[in-house]
Amino acid sequence: MAGELVFYNTLTRRKERFAPVDPRRVRMYVCGPTVYQRIHVGNARPLVVFDVLFRLLRRVFGEEHVVYVRNITDIDDKIIEQAKKNGEPIEALTARTTRDFHRDAEALSCLPPTHEPKATEHLAEMIALVEVLLAKGHAYEADGHVLFHVPSMPAYGRLSGRDREEQIAGARVEVAPFKKDPADFVLWKPSSPDQPGWESPWGRGRPGWHIECSAMAERYLGPLPFDIHAGGQDLIFPHHENEIAQSCCARGTELMARFWLHNGFVQMAGEKMAKSLGNVVRVAEVLERYPGEVVRLWLLSAHYRQPLECSEAALSEAREALRRWYRVLADAGIGAEDPGESEGRVAEALSDDLATPAAIAVLHGLATEANKARSAGEREALARLLKGEAGLLGLLHADPVAWLRHAAPARALSDETIERMLAERREARKNRDFARADAIRAELEAAGIVLKDRPDGRTDWERR
RNA sequence: GGCCCGGUGGCAGAGUGGCCAUGCAGCGGACUGCAAAUCCGCGUACGUCGGUUCGAUUCCGGCCCGGGCCUCCA
């Protein structure tokens, strides 16, 4: 097993050796979804990438020694708007969207996090945190709001690498008249009677966007700093910068988290996939055409910090790779229940800043070795190794034969019909009536069924 | 305008100061009744101009091009 983990830390902009504060309690936090719409494949990237990180940490430090927190943001102005637009209660919208989110995450083979706190269930922690910031002079009340005063924190801007001068020069920041400084951001804001709100020392209101993560991260991962905080690159500023400001100023620590990992964007035609650009593809849409495992492999096919292009070509390439691996398992008779074996080859690849492309190359290498194996025993051992190594990536857990038959959507022919035609073809071949046998094969092929005659007389088939 | 990434063979995508990524596609061969699958073999790849070096795709600088953040956003 790889002894050393190295991750790229956004905070220092270089790769650093990772060692947790407490190896018996490795703590990671990943920003979760705001539940007002189903997630798109861009949202799915951090979900899958950091699921691999979770699996790797569990492997290295032990399953019981890793705490993974991923929040559910169920109070937010976008949620309020969406509920109004749908004409449904906020709770109905957030409950349904949360359920759909869990469905998508499961389809992508993501392990459930250790804790999945909801913002609405942690108002007390948020209010307490705001009170501390007020008491320490890092926040002030103005016009019913509570604002974080950015100039009160000299180190502000460290994560995103920008200083206050640049902030102001940006000039695109909307400056509310009651702000003491243009960079100040909301910790708490008042709610009108028709908006959801909670009683607080500053009247009935609701939390700002950033405070929930500070409150919930500390609630489940404290004391600060914890080990890893992760999310998409677009969260570096302002979200993570502001989380750091809140947490560090409240607790007087230099760091909120020691490592900050950020994934690159999924792109469509070379452009970031984003709701604001209107080029999003929902996970659910892709799952209608590809197994979740294909989507997962595709999301891992580029290094997590690089951009990843979403295209049919990329998705079908991932499907072909999985077919190749599942054929190895099927040929060796490895079933879904076989746990496989691992020599830590994938773990070693991932140890270098989650190098998933290198890990995938390991799997391809094992598949080639297995295909070259001279004996059945050797082949089976290598296939079992392939399966075991793939486990750390959350891949190859399905039944191989079934997967190959159902990796593409069923078209005209049912499994039963196919089996019946194969029986007829077997008869024809036995009688050396190859014209008839080939006609049946052509008919099946037209329906997306590809045959594979084996030396022992049986015939395997796949849907493509 | 400020800050940050990246430009690798037909495509996707790693990586390294001198030797191999890996996969897909393509070409040739083996196997097969024919296929499919599989195996074997085959490709003057590193944006551009300079610099450092015995030697640079890899280090440094300029330039060109693309993407991102600075505003809700994974």
Image (cartoon, grey):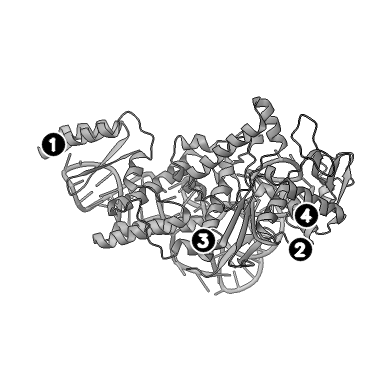
Give me the C-alpha separation between circle 3 and circle 1.
53 Å
What residue is pinned by disc 1?
Answer: A427
Q: Residue furthest left?
A: A431
| Residue A231, x across and y down, in percent | 63, 50
Task: Name the amino acid, label 2.
Answer: Glu
Does mark 3 fall on the same chain as mark 4? yes
Say which mark, if any, is on residue A15.
none
First in residue order: circle 4 vs circle 2: 4
What residue is pinned by disc 2?
Answer: A254
Is A439 drawn above or below residue A16 in the view shown?
above
Give me the C-alpha separation between circle 1 and circle 2.
77 Å
Q: Residue at x 31, y 61 (%)?
A: A381
Give me the C-alpha separation between circle 4 and circle 2.
10 Å
Does mark 2 fall on the same chain as mark 1? yes
Q: Secondary structure at mark 3?
A: helix
Task: Name the amino acid, label 1.
Answer: Glu
First in residue order: circle 1 vs circle 2: 2
Q: Secondary structure at mark 1?
A: helix
Which of these two is toward me, A108 or A203? A203
